[in-house]
Amino acid sequence: MGRRSAANVERVLGPTSRRFRAALLVILVLAAGIRTTFILAVARHDHSFYDAGYYELQARQLGKGHGYNDPFEFLPGHPHRSRPAADHPPLTVFAILPVIWAGDQLGLAEPTTQLIVRFEILIVGLFGIVLMAMLARRLAGETAGLIAAGIAAIYPYLWVNDGLIMSEAFAVAAVVGALLLFLRLVEQPSRNVAAGLGVVCGLAALARAELILLAPLLAIPLFWTWRTRSLRTRLTSIAVVGLGALVVVGPWVAFNQSRFSDTTFISTNDGIAILGSTCDAVFFGRAIGLTNLTVCIPKHAPPGDQSRISKIYRQRAIAYINDGRRGQFVKVVAARVARDWGLFRPKDMLFINEAEGRPRWLTNLGLWFYYPLLALAIVGAIVLRRRRVRMWFLLVPPVIVTAGALLSYGQTRFRVPAEPIIVVLAAVAMTAAARRRAPRGQSTMEASVSR
């Protein structure tokens, strides 16, 4: 990257201008209004059972002192057995636990506590918008930052997550926060910044399991990015990033190793995800590349704890593929990735998302936003490339999203960690277009002020 990275790396910008802060505040008020409307008019009336039910129930059972076990075992009419559980990474559960516990202590009705939790996640979503604005500002100036914030405020595939009790809002904030810290580390190498990057990457992994790849994919390339720096500096920074991530993720991994019979790191959900997308129902026909837990997963689980069951499911999925279906598996993988990116039968997501708190009209509205934004994002990448601005790190979330689809199935919400990249790059493209249309003097002045 020699001459390119030295000539025009991301600049350390000064403090944000008063105009930027005021405009961003207005955008955040708009974003909060959209999300509040969705929560009060739609999300609070959602009674479907999906992952949100697990997060809430797990937090509620933890608050009652039942430990991190299968929360469904403690429902009325169940045997109240303490069976260790790691169905999903724990960040979402721990984040909503204080609100759930306080609500129980105050004797609030469950719907009331649930509504407060939704607004807690809304705040996390607003924080994510601020981070996207700052990332776009670092790459292309304050105008780009405000445009990115505006897009994020109204983009349905982002604001829907801020009204659901799910992990996506936390993943967005962690991913964008990690990218900002990466930029700072590149500009001003520091052990504190490297440690901070590792910690945020660790939090991302505890939000969504596939984001365990975030730390190595950001840290290891520093070895080649910093060619002009000493070998010791490069290796030390990479090691500190890894150590920061380990400090966050390590206790959860150690906890899982102490209570499961088979090796378990972040989650035991991989077995169900893999086998649920590996059977005839989703290998052939119109449902290719999707998942079908009803058909692919046996009605009666094999004996053992979650880790053993997950291992057996993985083995069954591999055996299914090796049984003369390797050629078809290539087609299935292509369908999974294409579905993840909305490039193959996107209308199927209308009814699939409906089962996860996302009404059909909302998914359809999101598609109308998504395709123009994706096209603009490609243009934005070209703009940054021509300006010789370092941008490879922006590809890390899309790479992780694609890797996740390869191993599981195609689903719109799995693309969430990459949505901020689409927003930021689209903002870069729109800013560049606006400057080309502006009078020469005005464009030059605006560019100098925003940078």
Image: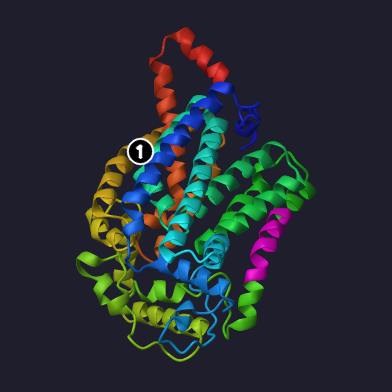
> Label 1 neighbourhood size at 10 Å, few (<14), some (14-19), many (20+)?
many
Left or right of 12? Residue 336 is left
Asked if the magenta segment contains residue 248, the reply would be: yes
Residue 39: where, in percent of width, then height?
37, 51
Q: Residue at x 45, y 84 (%)?
A: 312
Q: Secondary structure at mark 1?
A: helix
Left or right of 386? Residue 250 is right
Segment tinted magenta in the rendering: 239-252
**Quadrant (top left, top right, bottom left, bottom right) of the C terminus:** top right
Q: Residue at x 62, y 58 (%)?
A: 202
Left or right of 393? Residue 287 is left
Q: Residue furthest bottom?
A: 303
Q: Residue at x 40, y 78 (%)?
A: 318
Residue 172: where, in percent of width, then height?
50, 50
Q: Is residue 390 visible?
A: yes
The residue to which callout 1 is attached is: 373
Asked if the magenta segment contains residue 210, the reply would be: no
Q: Nearer the viewer, residue 220 or 438?
A: 438
Q: Nearer the viewer, residue 232 or 294?
A: 294
Q: Is residue 380 visible?
A: no
Left or right of 295? Residue 90 is right
Q: In the displayed structure, would residue 317 be above or below residue 113?
A: below
